[in-house]
């Protein structure tokens, strides 16, 4: 039992201060509305027939407005005032801290604007999908322009005096600070190109054991096996396909989507393991705290650290392939040895598509998006210029130009969701994943466990250090609690330098 647990036990033995119970019931209703909205979004992306969009936009908008009303409620404001000086346990204080932050942001934003953003993003999804299918940025331009304007309006409503991009970034990563994020991204952008250049100059060619195309049914059987092996709880989850893989749910029901590429079965496998990491975070949250911030996941960098941990530090390891190579032979008929499969999952090769990028070039995809969206939100770049700037930066960073906008600026769903400020959290997630893996290896033999298919100790470690805390700690405090130090790019840079140095004989 930690000191905090002891404090809870003491505070929990007596009744909490008077308004706390009512406050907590209100908070739970707010969470349930948000979770229902998330499920409608899952349905829209996975199950809903095309014709459903107009009705779904209205439903999403109504729930969004309801959530906003609950969050800006006068009673809630009064309870937050009453609880400011109340004698609360550290856990209760954390709940108040999280809700206060959300409440204060929400009261700054007019109901009408919330509603307009929700409806605009819901309508934007099919427009983006069609524009992407047709590789026609012009068809998406007005929609994107509207979304940027709405999000600028949103940032200004929260704080008209601050950088709107910093305000939007805090929507996804509230406690870290844009300055910390920029410092880490700058470090990656400064260090990785040299390593990528050395790899390009290397004489080594890594194995590519996959040729031709593979049936979706075989690929599906393969990724289902991977989920079984890694320990996905099918009684609390499911696997479907969607344009852009994602995870949605709670500790009771965390669903994964993936997608299958006929000629690249490793793409579907990697995506699935990635989403599995997100799902295990949700499934590892304390059940008894469902509906409160203590039963909710921390923000996006932490979430992404869980997916990247499984995708990269497990799924792209030699030990994983010793375990999993027979499944590839079973389902795909590819008789590759574990070493060849390890090489195949770790080929460094600059390409136009972020979600297909390797562990190294990935972060230059993020740098490009970060710079473009920051300039869009700050008003330093016109939406009409996005394709040209995208292609120029792609050339500068990765030495290539996408063949069309579908393989360029239309490839990601994020901006059509109004998610500006989200991209940096991907790189931060990789950085934290490496930091967690380094800390874990001090406590247990990760590679041996992976080779033996013994994933319980790995799940237990992550649950103990990260999942069980929910939002008990702010992100910087959680990172310190889990790893003993502040967020740093050092472990990630050491990991990729060692790994790729060995692979490419540098
Ligand atoms: Zn992810």
Image (cartoon, helix red, strand yellow):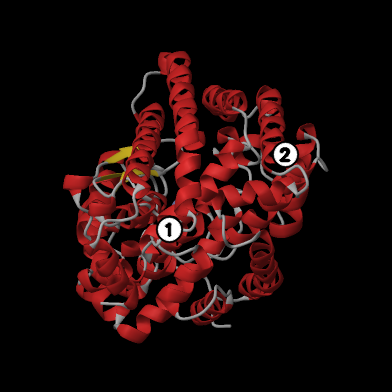
317 left or right of 505? Answer: left
- The one nearer the camera, 271 or 458, is 458
Q: Which mark is residue 86?
A: 1
Residue 341 versus residue 198 in the image, above or below? above
Disc 2/disc 1 C-alpha distance (Å): 32 Å
User: Extreme left residue here?
Assistant: 235
The N terminus sits in image quarter: bottom left
Residue 216: x percent and y percent?
Answer: 31, 40
Residue 155: x percent and y percent?
Answer: 68, 40
The C terminus sits in image quarter: bottom right
Mark closer to the chain start, 2 or 1: 1
Q: Can residue 251 be seen in this view?
A: yes
Residue 114 versus residue 286 in the image, above or below? above
Name the mark nearer the viewer: 2 or 1: 1
Q: Mark 2 points at which residue?
A: 156
- Rendered residue at 38%/44% (across/down): 23
Judged from the image, the secondary structure of the residue bearing numbered disc 2 is: helix
378 left or right of 14? Answer: right
Q: Can residue 461 be seen in this view?
A: no
Pointers 2 and 1 in contact (CB under 8 A)?
no
Judged from the image, the secondary structure of the residue bearing numbered disc 1 is: loop
Residue 36, picture quadrant: top left
Mark 2 residue CB less than 8 A from any atom of ligand 1? no
- The one nearer the camera, 338 or 53, is 53
Residue 389, picture quadrant: top right
């Amino acid at each position: 039992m930690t000191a905090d647990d002891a404090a809870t036990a003491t505070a929990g033995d007596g009744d909490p201060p008077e308004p706390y119970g009512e406050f907590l019931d209100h908070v739970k209703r707010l969470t349930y509305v948000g979770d229902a909205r998330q499920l409608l979004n899952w349905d829209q992306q996975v199950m809903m027939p095309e014709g459903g969009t107009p009705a779904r936009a209205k439903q999403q908008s109504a729930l969004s407005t309801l959530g906003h009303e609950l969050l800006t409620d006068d009673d809630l404001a009064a309870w937050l005032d009453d609880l400011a000086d109340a004698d609360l346990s550290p856990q209760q204080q954390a709940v108040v801290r999280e809700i206060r932050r959300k409440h204060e942001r929400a009261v700054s934003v007019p109901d009408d604007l919330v509603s307009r953003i929700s409806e605009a993003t819901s309508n934007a999804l099919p427009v983006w999908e069609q524009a992407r299918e047709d590789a026609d940025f012009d068809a998406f331009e007005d929609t994107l322009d509207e979304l940027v304007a709405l999000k600028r309006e949103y940032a200004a409503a929260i704080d008209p005096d601050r950088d709107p991009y910093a305000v939007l970034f805090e929507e996804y990563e509230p406690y870290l600070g844009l300055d910390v994020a920029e410092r880490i991204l700058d470090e990656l952008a400064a260090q990785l190109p040299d390593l990528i250049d050395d790899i390009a100059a290397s004489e080594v060619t890594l194995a590519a054991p996959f040729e031709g195309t593979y049936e979706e049914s075989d690929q599906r059987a393969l990724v289902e096996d991977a989920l079984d092996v890694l320990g996905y709880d099918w009684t609390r989850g499911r696997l479907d396909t969607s344009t852009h893989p994602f995870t949605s749910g709670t500790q009771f029901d965390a669903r994964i989507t993936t997608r299958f590429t006929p000629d690249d079965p490793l793409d579907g496998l990697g995506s699935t393991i990635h989403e599995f990491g997100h799902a295990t975070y949700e499934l590892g949250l304390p059940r008894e705290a469902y509906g409160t911030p203590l039963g909710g996941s921390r923000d996006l960098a932490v979430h992404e650290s869980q997916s990247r941990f499984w995708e990269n530090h497990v799924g792209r390891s030699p030990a994983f392939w010793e375990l999993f190579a027979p499944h590839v032979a079973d389902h795909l008929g590819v008789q590759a040895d574990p070493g060849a499969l390890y090489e195949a999952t770790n080929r460094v090769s600059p390409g136009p598509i972020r979600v297909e990028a390797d562990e190294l070039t990935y972060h230059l995809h993020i740098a490009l998006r970060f710079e473009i969206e920051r300039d869009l939100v700050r008003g330093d770049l016109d939406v009409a210029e996005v394709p040209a700037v995208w292609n120029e930066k792609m050339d500068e960073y990765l030495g290539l130009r996408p063949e069309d906008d579908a393989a360029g600026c239309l490839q990601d769903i994020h901006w059509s969701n109004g998610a500006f400020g989200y991209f940096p959290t991907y790189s931060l997630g990789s950085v934290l994943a490496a930091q967690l893996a380094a800390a874990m290896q001090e406590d247990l033999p990760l590679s041996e466990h992976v080779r033996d298919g013994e994933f319980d100790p790995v799940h237990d470690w992550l649950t103990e250090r990260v999942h069980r805390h929910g939002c008990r700690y702010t992100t910087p405090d959680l990172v310190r609690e889990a790893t003993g130090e502040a967020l740093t790019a050092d472990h990630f840079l050491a990991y990729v330098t060692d790994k790729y140095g060995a692979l490419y004989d540098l």
